Image: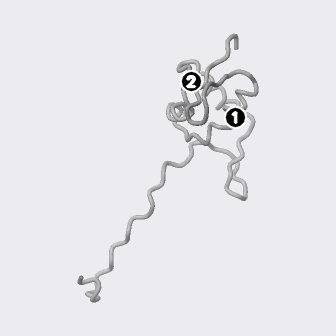
Amino acid sequence: MGNLLGDGKPTPKKPGPKRGPRSAVRGKRLKDGRIRRSPEQLEALKNRIWSEVRKQPGARAESLAQALGLKTKDITLPISQLLAEKRLTKRGKLRGTGYFPTKGK
């Protein structure tokens, strides 16, 4: 109540919103805030994801991101590229999607 009456003490600041860890993905930042990764960075990330899926067949995006120390949003593009290249297959829908390595690659 002393702060309301002006006893000369500064009021403590309220803590700001809690934010998660920053993205570990590095690249060129665009004007709108997005990060543009080089083809070499994407290829390296795709290889890391593919090797993790080989270790854990059926893993979901959340567990893959956690195992790689990344955010889920950082691995969506490489996963979609791996699916297009047919290096991965998927089963399930939405958050229940599990990823599997294809045979022979």
Q: Earlier in the sequence, mark 2 or mark 1?
A: 1
- Please tell me whether residue 23 is drawn above or below residue 39 in the rendered image: below
Residue 35: x percent and y percent? Answer: 68, 48
State the residue in front, 92 or 103: 92
Residue occupying the point 53% across, 32% down: 68
- Reading the image, the residue beneath label 2 is 52
Q: Which mark is residue 27?
A: none
Q: Residue at x 38, y 69 (%)?
A: 14
Residue 42's disc number: 1
Q: How is the image coloured?
A: one colour
- The image position of residue 89, as x and y in percent, is 67, 22
Label 1: how many residues lie within 10 Å, few (<14), some (14-19) or many (20+)? some
Left or right? Give the position of 1 relative to 10: left
Secondary structure under tag 1 reads helix
CA gap, disc 2 and disc 1:
15 Å
Q: Residues within 10 Å of mark 2 (few under 14, many from 20)?
A: some
Q: Is residue 40 above or below residue 101?
A: below
> What's under tag 2, amino acid-wise?
Glu
Front-lying residue, 9 or 75:
75
